[in-house]
């Protein structure tokens, strides 16, 4: 395989946190932004009408939605770290992502190869660049971690491959 780009890095907490908050949990935040005000308003309206049963129901809904928004990101981060440890036998291996005829990911004993047409979406974040190939699965790249090629050329390349 002719390697056009190679990205190497060790995953750090900022990268993982940003991926979880801005990619994986984005839909939860949007749903919360819609339903929290509705539940809050409905709780207020039912309290003013002195319908305490419905006020309690809407209050519980408000609590559950808020609790879900607050607890999901830390649990997701913890789950990702645990799965990574289990997959790599508790060791911190360098992630090596190579781009040629296809995309090859190696990290310790874990290896995965995907085709460019499997990439659904790209997220450019502050500490990382994410190539999503499923709804909740992506390849995280470190913009400063390119050992073959450079980040700006890679962005043009991946944009052309997705077009």
Image (tube, grey):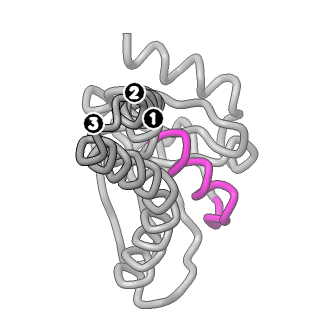
Disc tally is 3
User: Where on the picture, by quarter, is residue 133?
Assistant: top left
The answer to the question of whether label 2 and label 1 lie on touching residues, with beta carbons closer than 8 A, is: no
Is 94 colored magenta in this rendering? no
Q: Name the residue at 52% across, 65% down.
A: 74
Mark closer to the observer (2, 1):
2
- Residue that protrudes farthest toward the front in the picture: 50
Relative vertical location of residue 157 with respect to residue 31 in this rendering, above or below:
above
Estimate the spatial distance between the alpha carbons at disc 2 and disc 1, rounded to whole Å.
9 Å
Name the side, left or right, on which 155 lies relative to 105. Answer: right
Image quarter in which the C terminus is found: top left
Crowding at label 2, few (<14), some or many (≥20) Cα neighbours within 10 Å? some
**Between 4 and 85, the one nearer to me in the picture:** 85
User: Disc number at residue 45?
Assistant: 2
Query: At 45% from the left edge and 32% from the top edge, which residue is drawn?
Result: 44
- Percent position of residue 38, x then y: 39, 27
Between residues 98 and 40, which one lies in front from this camera angle?
40
Specify the farthest residue to the top: 163
Residue 102's spot in the image, x, y percent? 34, 39
Q: Which mark is residue 115?
A: 3
In magenta, the rendered stretch is 9-23
- Assess disc 3: are there few (<14), some (14-19) or many (≥20) residues with their C-alpha within 10 Å of its C-alpha: few
Residue found 40% across the figure and 46% down from its top: 62
Residue shown at the point (26%, 32%) measured from the top left:
118
Residue labelled with disc 1: 40
146 above or below 68? above
> In the displayed structure, does residue 110 sit left or right of residue 25?
left
Query: Residue 108's quadrant in the figure?
Result: bottom left
**Mark 2 / mark 3, whichever is N-terminal:** 2
């Amino acid at each position: 395989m002719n390697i056009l780009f190679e990205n190497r890095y060790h995953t750090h907490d900022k990268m993982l946190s940003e991926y979880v908050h801005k990619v994986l949990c984005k839909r939860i935040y949007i749903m919360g932004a819609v339903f929290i005000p509705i539940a809050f308003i409905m709780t207020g309206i039912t309290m003013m009408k002195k319908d305490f049963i419905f006020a309690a129901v809407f209050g519980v809904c408000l609590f559950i939605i808020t609790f879900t928004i607050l607890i999901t990101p830390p649990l997701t981060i913890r789950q990702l770290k645990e799965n990574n440890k289990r997959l790599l036998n508790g060791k911190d291996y360098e992630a090596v992502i190579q781009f040629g005829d296809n995309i090859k990911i190696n990290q310790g004993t874990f290896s995965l190869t995907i085709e460019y047409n499997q990439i659904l979406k790209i997220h450019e974040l502050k500490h990382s660049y994410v190539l999503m190939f499923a709804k909740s699965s992506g390849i995280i790249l470190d913009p400063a971690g390119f050992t073959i090629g450079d980040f700006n050329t890679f962005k043009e390349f991946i944009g052309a491959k997705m077009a």
